[in-house]
Image (spheres, helix red, strand yellow):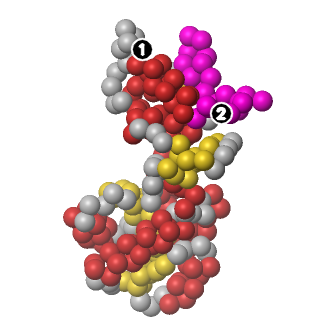
Amino acid sequence: MANICLVEDEQKVSAFICKGLEEHGYKLKVAKDGAAAKGLLQTADFDLLILDVMLPDINGIELCRQIRLNDTKTPILMLTALDQVQNKVSGLKAGADDYLVKPFHFVELLARIEALLRRQSVNAPEDHTLIFGDLKLDTWSSVAERAGNQITLTAKEFALLELFMRHPNKVLSREYIAEQVWKIDFDTGTNFIDVYVNYLRNKIEKGFKNKLIHTVIGMGYILKNDK
Ligand code: CA
């Protein structure tokens, strides 16, 4: 479920929002001012931000503008008071995606959040497509292709290839692969990782001149273009 960062100094309002959203399965982190918000944004990834305009240390609109300098993607919903109509315009100009006027009904907040998250997933089709050289992986439809030809992979082979494609040009140790793909601690007495890597190699390299998955002796495996 989505992670939401709420920037709001009024305890009553933030408690109301958190309670309602958590009941709907969202995970919330609350910042009481702009400085705390910036700290949170540096340490965690959020799917959506809710910014109140009236904050103790910074105007929410200015905060929005500053966030947008580094992050153009995360949806931002501004909360503004009824007598601050000008804020709506300024907020949208500063990069907010939507605004809600206080006081609001919880169902309206929920509807806005759902709409923003839906829009975000439609706008970002590249997020579920991984590309490395002529390899293409669609993590939603679980389709793998090399040079336009579909490759049939088992679930574990797919997960293994996805791991390599999320970390191209990096050596992945057998321990890391076991932990990420099989969710188990690697037992050095077995060679199942090597066996699976070879299955995968056969499927993605057969009929092609250049190798993609290379053995790094004593360390693990690396996905790289060998040209
Ligand atoms: Ca406030």
Residue 158 vs residue 53, the one in the foreground: 158
Instruction: Characterize the local packing of mark 1: few (<14), some (14-19) or many (20 or more) Cα atoms within 10 angstroms.
Output: few
* Residue 171 is one of the magenta-drawn residues: no
Q: Which amino acid does label 1 sit on?
A: Asn
Q: How far apart are marks 1 and 2 (CA)?
A: 26 Å
The tag earlier along the polypeptide, 1 or 2, is 1
Residue 221 vs residue 167, the one in the foreground: 221
Quarter of the figure with residue 48 = bottom left
Count of labels in the image: 2
Which segment is the magenta one? 204-227
Asked if residue 170 is positioned above or below residue 96 in the image, the reply reads: above
Asked if residue 208 is positioned above or below residue 11 in the image, the reply reads: above
Residue marked by disc 1: 191
Rendered residue at 51%/36% (across/down): 161
Quarter of the figure with residue 224 = top right
Task: Pick out the residue farthest to the front.
Answer: 207
Residue 20 vs residue 90, the one in the foreground: 20
* Residue 214 is one of the magenta-drawn residues: yes
Image position of 52 (left or right of 42): left
Task: Pick out the residue farthest to the right.
Answer: 227
Residue marked by disc 2: 207
Asked if residue 7 is positioned above or below residue 177 in the image, the reply reads: below
Rendered residue at 45%/20% (across/down): 195
Image position of 11 (left or right of 131): left
- The quadrant of the image that shows the C terminus is top right
